[in-house]
Amino acid sequence: MDFKKLLENNKAWANLRVEEDPEFFKRLANLQKPEFLWIGCSDSRVPANQITDTQPGEIFVHRNIANVVVHTDVNLSAVLDYAVNILKVNHVIVCGHYGCGGVRAAMTRTDFKPILNKWLRNIKDVYRFHQEELDAIPDEEQRADRLVELNVREQVLNLAKMSTIQKAWKTEGRPHLHGWAYGLKDGYINPILHLPPGSPIDPLYEYEDL
């Protein structure tokens, strides 16, 4: 597809929105009060608004390969800080998806060169944490699907280890943390994990002087 087609599609979309709702863009320009922060995969088949049937402005979105939460990722930390402390979101959702190419790549011993290798190692670590369970699954697709779920779970736990979340839990009783996995084959979201504010975590990761 030529890039010009995207610009043409944009004009058609914008005109249709105004025909259906003359105040659509005026509302968007003047208000952003999302209830949710979505940490999802960069895969173009998993657009947050479409699969949840929500409108622009209702979900604040951060995406990366295989929806990982890395405490040294300044980009993610900045998004999380803005969402939690400025936008005051009540829910943070980590949404992975079955058939994730990043997860499948992490299951191999292929050299994807330095940058991707570093990123995928976060998922390899998840495999190592749960290796006994995963190695016991003979079917490769089912094993990959289970790793998708375990990866989502570990990333939610990584969120709970961050001081931004713990401080908001302590002072404001929010946000709820959710881990979901989206099915490319059927379009359904499978809830994996829910951590309400104040959920216990390993004491080693708890901050006392927030």
Image (tube, rainbow, N blue to C red):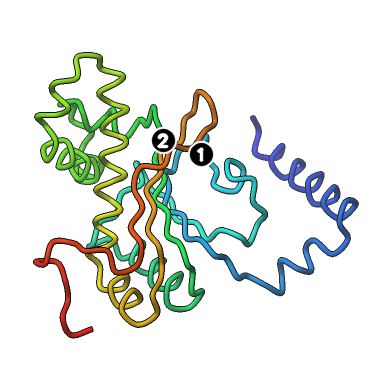
Q: Is there CB contact under 8 Å for labels 2 and 1?
A: yes
Crowd tier of the residue under label 2, counting other residues whose Cα lies within 10 Å: few below 14, some 14–19, many 20 or above: many
Residue drawn at point x = 33 percent, y = 58 percent: 195
Question: Is the C terminus in the top left, top right, bottom left or bottom right quadrant?
Answer: bottom left
Q: Residue at x 14, y 36 (%)?
A: 130
Q: Splitting the image into 4 quarters, where does residue 71 fall?
A: bottom left
Q: Is residue 123 shown above or below 141?
A: below
Which quadrant does the N terminus fall into?
A: top right
User: In the rendered image, which residue does mark 1 sit on?
Assistant: 46
According to the picture, the residue beneath numbered tag 2 turns out to be: 97
Q: Is residue 46 above or below residue 49?
A: above
Q: Quadrant of residue 203?
A: bottom left
Q: Quick one: SS at disc 1?
A: loop
Depicted 107 relative to depicted 175: above or below? above
Three-letter residue code for mark 2: His
Where residue 151 appears, as percent x and y from the top left, is 27, 41
- In terms of image quadrants, where is residue 175? bottom left
**Callout 2: helix, strand or loop?**
strand
Type of the residue with mark 1: Val
